[in-house]
Amino acid sequence: MKILLFLEEAAVLEETISLCYLALAERAAETALRREFERLAEEENNHALVIRTGKNYVRKEPDLFGDAMIDMTELQAGLKLVRAVLETIRAGTSAFPDSVRRMRDIESRFEKLHMATVMPVRDESLRELFRQLARDDRDHGLVLDRILAEAAPR
């Protein structure tokens, strides 16, 4: 089933985003900032678990997802992007604020992807799982906006 592959790739994407936050935590100068990135990393790992829960739903009830799903190319392009961002964070080849901005853009992009995924889902509890992922992505973006604002020169 194409949907199972889609959901597994989405879970891998969330895990890779988590690794980005852990890499940012390692580069963070302040303890509070490090903890904030570690919290975001944990939430992204939880997203992967939620998505894998969706896979279990599909295995049991394959008709819970409608026919229309996000094109795998969007997901794969996102995964490629996140892996590239992870490498630049780990290598230290981009300034810390630039890395945070890139993560902000990624959160915005995947908030939209999660919302688009909700549309063809027929089961309300499963729809709510994806709505929550979108809300969390939005909230992560707000946290990143706050971090960027606090780091801005005054």
Image (cartoon, helix red, strand yellow):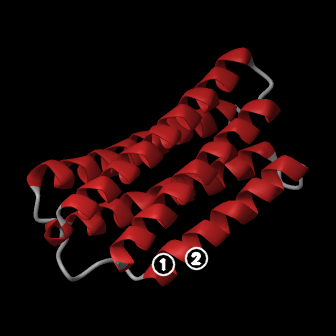
110 sits to left or right of 128: right
Question: Does residue 115 appear anywhere in the picture?
Answer: yes
Question: Quick check: 129 above or below 27?
Answer: below
* Separation of residues labelled 2 and 1 (CA atoms): 5 Å
Secondary structure category for the residue under label 1: helix
Residues at discs 2 and 1 in contact (Cβ within 8 Å): yes
Check residue 77 in the rendering and tell me which mark sits there, or answer none.
2
Q: In which quarter of the image is residue 58?
A: bottom left
Q: Which residue is drawn at 48% across and 35% down?
A: 43
Check residue 87 in the rendering and tell me which mark sits there, or answer none.
none
Secondary structure category for the residue under label 2: helix
Q: Where is residue 106 in the image (x, y as percent from the top left)?
A: 54, 59
Residue closest to the far top:
31
Q: Which of 55 and 70 is in front in this view?
A: 55
- Mark 2: which amino acid? Ala
Few, some or many C-alpha atoms within 10 Å of disc 1 (few <14, some 14-19, many ≥20)?
few
- Mark 1: which amino acid? Glu
Q: Residue at x 37, y 42 (%)?
A: 136
> The C terminus appears in which quarter of the rendering?
top right
Q: Nearer the viewer, residue 95 or 72?
A: 72
Question: Does residue 146 appear anywhere in the picture?
Answer: no
> The N terminus appears in which quarter of the rendering?
bottom left
151 sits to left or right of 73: right
Q: Position of residue 92 (x, y in %)?
A: 88, 49
39 sits to left or right of 93: left
Few, some or many C-alpha atoms within 10 Å of disc 2 (few <14, some 14-19, many ≥20)?
few
Q: In which quarter of the image is residue 39?
A: top right
Q: Residue at x 38, y 47 (%)?
A: 138
Check residue 74 in the rendering and tell me which mark sits there, or answer none.
1
Q: Where is residue 5 in the image (x, y as percent from the top left)?
A: 44, 72
Q: Where is residue 18 in the image (x, y as percent from the top left)?
A: 60, 44
Q: How many labels does the image show?
A: 2
